[in-house]
Image (tube, rainbow, N blue to C red):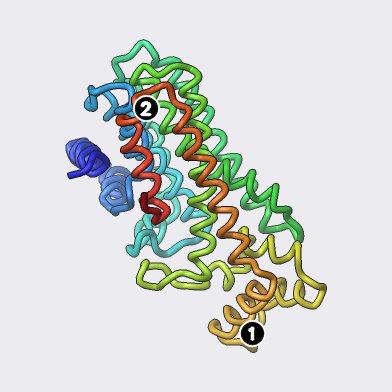
Amino acid sequence: MNPSERLLSLVENYLAQTALPAEPERLYTPIGYSLAGGGKRLRPVLLMLSHAIFSDNAPQALPAAAAIELFHNFTLLHDDIMDHAPLRRGKPSVYAKWGENVAILSGDAMMIAAYDRLARLQTPQLAQILAVFNRTALEVCEGQQYDMDFEERQKVSVAEYMQMIELKTSVLLAGAVVIGALLGGASEADCRRLRRFAVELGLAFQLQDDLLDSYGDERLGKTIGGDILEGKKTYLMITAMSRASEAEREVLRRTHADATLTDAEKIAAVKAVYDRLDVPHLTEQQIEVRFERALAQLDELDADPARVEPLRTYAESLLGRKH
């Protein structure tokens, strides 16, 4: 078992042993359902790997790892309400299964439970950790608001999109690694480096997700072309709009809503514009730049490279890279 798998097992066992009250059932059952719904546990594993660079006391970090996972799942419950999403990880969403009011209240309870886990940390760094967590939580909300605002705007720049995904996706990864490092006794400089690492990794991860949505493999468990059919402003769409002729922009703007076309025809029409404008290649280049910037931050850490290696290997696995 490699280090990330071992730490994932610790996180899973800790979450499984987290007892939820039996009543009121419609408040707590959806929380258990959400936490048991799978997912990569990406954020708590990053927290544990960051902590392990500076400390061998893995159990010390488990309450914080659980707090990050609870907060992440809280955001998913509320995202599904805002998106009217029927599915989450291949199963009915809490919103679809229990309704909007239950999803709101269970999500709120999950956020409170996250703070309860943080309060259990036995560390002199608790005030710093709470400050990081609070800043992270607010930035995630800001990112979600920007995302919703962008859906109502005709034009969004690449820079604005990158700022939005940094807030919506990257900052929770960054908060996780910084909290793990603080618990392990890392210096302020190393916490800054790890934050930058996680921000760049999150950007690469989100850009790859954008790319795979249009050019991936359905065996990944995701329907190809969903973003195109929704007319979503992804990195691919925004980059294409910035390079397109007016005729091509019309295709990009209107195809998803054209009732005369099948879904397959809509996807093919938009991807044809992407291909002409070299958008897949440009996206791959941006993913590579962000990923290399992330790894460069790990090289700067004031730590034994052997202790950093599991975090590097895990980051590479997230993007399908090999040494």
Q: Residue furthest right?
A: 246
The quarter of the displayed image where residue 239 is located? bottom right
Residue visible at 50% across and 66% down?
Answer: 213
Name the residue tied to disc 1: 259
The quarter of the displayed image where residue 163 is located? top right
Judge whether 301 appears above or below 251 on screen. Answer: above
In the image, residue 230 lies at what x, y percent?
Answer: 58, 69
What label sits on residue 85 in the rendered view?
Answer: none
- Horizontal placement of 131 versus 321: left or right? right
- Horizontal placement of 249 versus 21: left or right? right
Q: For residue 311, say whether it is visible.
A: yes
- C-alpha separation, residue under disc 1 versus residue under disc 2: 50 Å
Name the residue tied to disc 2: 180
Residue visible at 80% across and 78% down?
Answer: 247
Between 101 and 280, the one nearer to me in the picture: 280
Figure quadrant of the N terminus? top left
Amino acid carrying label 1: it is Ala
Between 210 and 152, the one nearer to me in the picture: 210
Amino acid carrying label 2: it is Gly
